[in-house]
Each structure stands twice: as structure tokens, then as C-alpha cells.
Image (cartoon, rainbow, N blue to C red):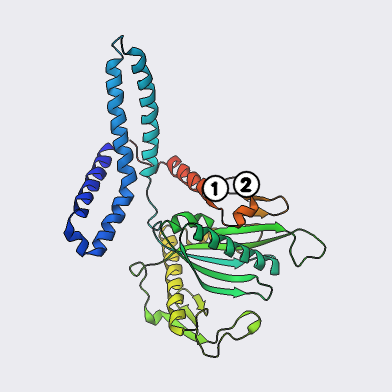
Amino acid sequence: MEEKLRQLERRFEAIEAQLMDGAVYSDMEKYRTLSREQKELAPVVEAWRRLMVRREDLAAALELAGDPDFKDSAQQEIALAKEDIARLEEELKVLLLPKDPNDGKNVILELRSGTGGEEAALFAHSLLRMYTMYAESKGWRVEVIGCNETELGGVKEAVLMIEGEGAYSRLKFESGVHRVQRVPVTESSGRIQTSAATVAVLPEAEAVDVNLDAKDLQIDTFRSSGAGGQHVNKTESAIRITHLPTGLVVECQDERSQYKNKDRAMKILASRLLDLEEQKQHGEIAAQRRSQVGSGDRSERIRTYNFPQGRVTDHRIGLTLYQIDAVMDGALDEIIDALVTADRAEALKNGAAAQI
């Protein structure tokens, strides 16, 4: 695969030359595209160049090893160079893994309370807060597109739009059923209860990703209402869009403007349709969607938040952290980093990496 790495280096150099051409600045779309490609190639090219330098260092040290005056220092350099070469080759294997085409996209994150009644809704609210704080710590923009709250402040269902670099590449591992074990505020006897909430992380669909035909859509308007049925306003600004071929239904009522609610609902619908299509292409539509969203039953879990023990356990990789307060305040990087590492290791194991 060295030829591939040389080709990538040549492409990187060509992009550098183009970006130095003043004419490119007049076409901002082209400039952004080239800058994005340059940023993606930079880690690969930098690692490849370091590898070439260390291979040259090794060759020079091997020559010096035959000279009695330089034998000891040469042997030390040989050992260091071999160690660096092995490390850089492994690094390049990871860097050459096939990229998820959705990694650069924004995120539509859906939360639903599952098993556990009001306590499940309160837990869903805690997860909403956790993801909002995590996103803000990354400098991402968070917008609540829709939120169906309970009278006690819980969340039956919520939809977030999260915009920022690397949002999907990090949050995609959060899809699944999250289980909580704690004493509910509604529990007078102090008994620990187990509840669940589901999380679905979808890449935001772009215009080129999904073609929505107007004849496939049924659009209804209704009055927005809050918890307990209290009217938010007296106009029919809320929107319900039904995609007739698939039966998918999206509602949006958080804005007073019917136009804004329709625009948001269309974004969510497009992203859900993109998600369905991608899973269908991979032959995993039913099984993968079930594993990602689940039924909300407490037995289908990817992560458990045990408050009495102060621990968070991710069952996919067997990771347990005794820092539940920090995690609930958005400190998710340690968990997500471990999931990213495990995902890369699995890809390497399956032979997806390039051989150097």
C-alpha cells in the first residue's frame, strides 16, 4: 500500500498548491471543499513522512553499526528507529481505515423515555441535559427541535439538532438503550428502581442525500400544546408530516411559526429516511434499527447508570467508571474515546485496514 500513500501525498501537495492560488478564493465552495480534503489528508501524510524519515534513519544506523567507533550509538538508534517504524506503521493502518461518510455531518439526536413510567421520563431529561452539556463543552451548537415534557419535568420524547465539527463521529456510539438504577424522586419508600430511555443518533441529511417527493407527504397542522394539554398559542402552527410510502411520522410544535416548524420537521424526516436507506443498503435495516433504538425495555441495554454505586458501565466494551456525577454533567470523552478505540480495533481485526 506504499503506492497508495505516495498517491495521497501527491494529492495533498496538489491541494496545497491550489489553495495558494488566489483564484480559488473567489470560489468559496471550492475553497471549503479543498480545505476539508486537506485537513482529512494531513494526518496520513504527516505520519507517512515521519515513517520515511525513520526508515532513512534506520538505514543510516545500520551502516554505522559496522564501524567500531559508532557501534554502541548505532545500536541504540537502530532500536529506537525500529520502535518508531512499528508504531508509525500501526498508526497508518488506523488512519487508512475506511471512513464513515457520515462522520463529518451534523446530528439529529432523538431521546425517548422507555420502561419505568415517570422515572424513565425524568431520566430521559437527565440524558437530554448530559448531551447538551457535552455538546457545549465541544463548542457545538445545540438546538431543541422538539420536546414533549411531562408535568413533573420529565421528557417523553425530545429531538435535538447538534451542529459542529466531529459531532456525528463522536455521538454515533450513543445510539441504543440506556438504563438507570436509582431511587426515584417519586418513590417514598427509598426503593431502587430500574428504568430505561432510548437514544437514536442520526446524521443530518443533506439536500443531495434524500429526494422528498411532495406527493409522498401528508402535511397536517394543529395547535401547539404543552404539558397537561395547556395551549402554547391559539394558532395552528404545529406541523405533522407523514411519509406515506414508509409510514414515518414527524411532529414539530416548538416554534410559533408554522414555516419554522415545517422546516424542522422536514429536516428530521429527511434524516430518518436517509438512516433507513443506508441500513437497507447494508442489508441490516430491521436488526440494526432495533439494536440502535430498541423497544425501551430495560433488558436491551448498552449502558447502565447506577446512582447508588456511583458508577457508569458501558456493556459493549465492559468499561466501568465510578464518576457518575461527572458523566451526567457531560464528561463523556473517556467513554467515547474507549468506544472509538474498540471500533477501530474491530475494523483492524476484520482486515479492513490497509497493509503497509
Task: Write the residue at 47% across / 58% down.
Answer: 284
What's the residue type where badge 2 is placed? Leu
Quarter-wise, where is residue 49 in the image?
top left
Residue 229, image x, y percentages: 64, 84
- Left or right of 81? Residue 167 is right
Q: In this view, which residue lies farthest toward the right?
A: 189
Helix, strand or loop at mark 2 = strand
- Left or right of 185? Residue 347 is left
| Category of crowding for the residue at label 1, using alpha-carbon neighbours closer than 10 angstroms: few (below 14), some (14–19), many (at least 20) | few
Q: Where the C terminus falls, by quadrant?
A: top left
Q: Which residue is mark 1?
A: 334
The one of 292 and 55 positioned closer to us in this rendering? 55
The one of 265 and 106 positioned closer to us in this rendering? 106
Helix, strand or loop at mark 1 = helix
| Category of crowding for the residue at label 2, using alpha-carbon neighbours closer than 10 angstroms: few (below 14), some (14–19), many (at least 20) | some
- Left or right of 191? Residue 235 is left
What's the residue type where badge 1 is placed? Glu
The one of 301 and 180 positioned closer to us in this rendering? 180
Q: In this view, which residue lies farthest toward the bottom?
A: 234
Of callouts 2 and 1, which one flags the residue occurring earlier in the amino acid sequence?
A: 2
Quarter-wise, where is residue 23 in the image?
bottom left
- Left or right of 88? Residue 318 is right
Residue contact at pointers 2 and 1, CB within 8 angstroms:
yes
Task: Write the residue at 40% across / 42% down.
Answer: 94
- Residue 321 — which label? 2
Residue 180, image x, y percentages: 67, 58
Q: Where the N terminus falls, by quadrant?
A: top left
Question: In this rendering, does residue 288 appear at all?
Answer: no
